[in-house]
Image: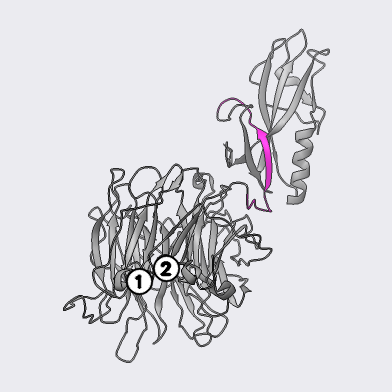
Amino acid sequence: MNDYSSCRPPRSQATAPRVGRSLTLMSGLGALLLVALLLVFGGEQAARAAHPAGIGAPGAPDWTQQGDLLSSYGFSVSGVVDVDNDGYDDFLVGAPGYNKAAGNAFLYRGTSSGLLTTTTDTFPGELDADQLGHQVAAAGDVNGDGVADFLISAPYGDTGVLSDTIAISDTGKVFVYLGQQTPGSLPTVDKSLHGESAGDQFGWSAGAAGDVNGDGYDDIIVGAQNHDRSLTDLDTGKVYVYHGSAGGIEATPSFTATGELALDFFGSAVAGAGDVNGDGYDDIIIGARGNDESGQDAGKVYVYHGGPSGLSATPAFTDVGTDVESNFGNAVAGTGDVNGDGYNDVIVGAGENGDDKFGVAVAGAGDVNGDGFGDLIVGARGYQTSTGRAYVYAGCAGGPQATAIFTATGEAAGTNFGRSVSGAGDVNGDGLDDVGAGAYGYGGGSGYKAYVYHGDATVGVCAAQIELAQTLGSGGEQPACTDAITVHVKSGDAVAFCYTVTNTGSAPLNRHSLTTSVYSEVFAGLPYDLAPGESYAFSATYPVTYTMDNVAVWASEWASTAPTLTAGSATTPTITASGTATATVVIVEGGLYLPLINKP
């Protein structure tokens, strides 16, 4: 994946995002809102929604595994980056029903050919009914050792139990594991965190928070949706953020927030949001699926900004569901930058109500097609009598494309495929991000499975981009003209064209007198006069000011028309140099040549 952050213009800091509009579309009465928290110089906020339309044939997985009967294997899945420092991202699957619901989680290692199909890296629950593996998630790098870490939750875990047959609290636990520097090593437990009170279900939701205070260590976020604010405010919900440090995750939360009212279930979903306001600090998003502000159980989400002292005490942004019992906020995730403006975006699901349950699970997918835009994945576990389906939507300059670029469907009714979805990182090291999904239901024996699908650079080309096969100009920062690659061009960029100029005459060619028959523009770039028979490859840059439809035509004309480059009559009136427009060269941003390369 390419990181273009260094080429973006400076961004103003902002205190709170302003959402100008939102488009919420529905599939089988499930709903999804993609809120793009975009703060650009004087620009208006944008909100986009993705909707499955024109769905093609279900996709075949590149990897799949099945768990034990009644194990709920696949209830949660997550890419966990590279936890063993071997250069390949790894994948974690939760099975909260395993072994009398003590639960378990299974770590699968990435390789050059994809994930291994077997594993001995398991993390069993402590006691019956703990349901460890309810949530599995990447944690970032909490101790700053350069190796990724992860977490596993057991929301029904008990503190102060008398035995493994007597559960007295359902306080909830979260276990943080540290990745290891030595390839193949098993991650080790860093901390075991637990909730405050009986029935809190601490760890119902949990994940990476990013680096909310800018200290160089990643932090984690945990939700306890059933926490009671008081004896009368039941199930208000509470969220905790723990800072990372050189010694690992701190034992005491640095930030807590509590729901507004009883039965809000604040913390039913939590996630790191990335840096939504461009101030250099990561932010978080929290869902409260039971909030009644806009109707019974319509739901609400909250975004808190990071800063040098950590997270803000009050949310910088909130939004509410539009329909009664829509449970807006039952799923939330950071998506990366889906529209390429330099600001990270978030996605909110409202999928518990409705037949398809579209939006019951949402996640950032990474960049599955290598175009430089963040993509997203959405689960619909209720699709076709709970067969379930997952949809991948590609990011684009104007926001995510409205049609899924890829769909995958469960194997049988009752499998609940898509109850969990996740970006999987790059498990096979091909430079493209992959996605995962789980099917935790029985489904007549076809369930209890996890699936991974590899990224593909041939799908999901953004409609607002133009794919141009090209060769690049030689010299300096530019690759050789013979290096064919693919780039993307959009309105507002500048495009440089590569020409090879050869002096076919018998006298020297004066570099200051070279003109072209196309557009009659003078080409600069020749560093010296050309001797007879000598050639030089260089490029000329032109701004793209045409509409997107015309850019393709304009670029095509230049690529197909070989302008005649003729030496000026004042010096060598009989000499003609033939120039061939072999292809476009690069997108030029901020004066820098920046090839946006999919695959060499």
- Percent x, y for residue 18? 54, 69
Asked which secondary structure carries label 2, the reply is loop
Q: Which residue is rendered at x = 34% and y = 53% of the image?
A: 119
| Residue behind mark 2 | 75
Q: Is residue 555 above or below residue 338?
A: above
Q: Is residue 525 visible?
A: no
The secondary structure making up most of the magenta span is: loop
Badge 2: few (under 14), some or many (20 or more) residues near its Cα, within 10 Å? many
On the image, which quarter does residue 592 sit in? top right
From the image, state whether disc 1 or disc 2 is nearer to you.
1
Residue interval drawn in magenta: 459-476
Is the C-beta separation of discs 1 and 2 under 8 Å? yes
- Residue 505 is left or right of residue 414, and the answer is right
Q: Earlier in the sequence, mark 1 or mark 2?
A: 2
Badge 1: few (under 14), some or many (20 or more) residues near its Cα, within 10 Å? many
- Percent x, y for residue 227? 32, 81
Q: Is residue 323 above or below residue 192?
A: below
Q: Amino acid at mark 1?
A: Gly
Q: Which residue is rendered at x = 49% and y = 71% of the image?
A: 444
Identify the mark at residue 97; answer none if there is no mark.
1
Between marks 1 and 2, how big is the CA–CA gap? 9 Å
Q: Amino acid at mark 2?
A: Phe
In the depicted view, which residue is nearer to us: 110 or 535? 110
Residue 471 belongs to the span the image colors magenta: yes
Q: Is residue 170 above or below residue 138?
A: below
Residue 126 belongs to the span the image colors magenta: no
The chosen color scheme is one colour
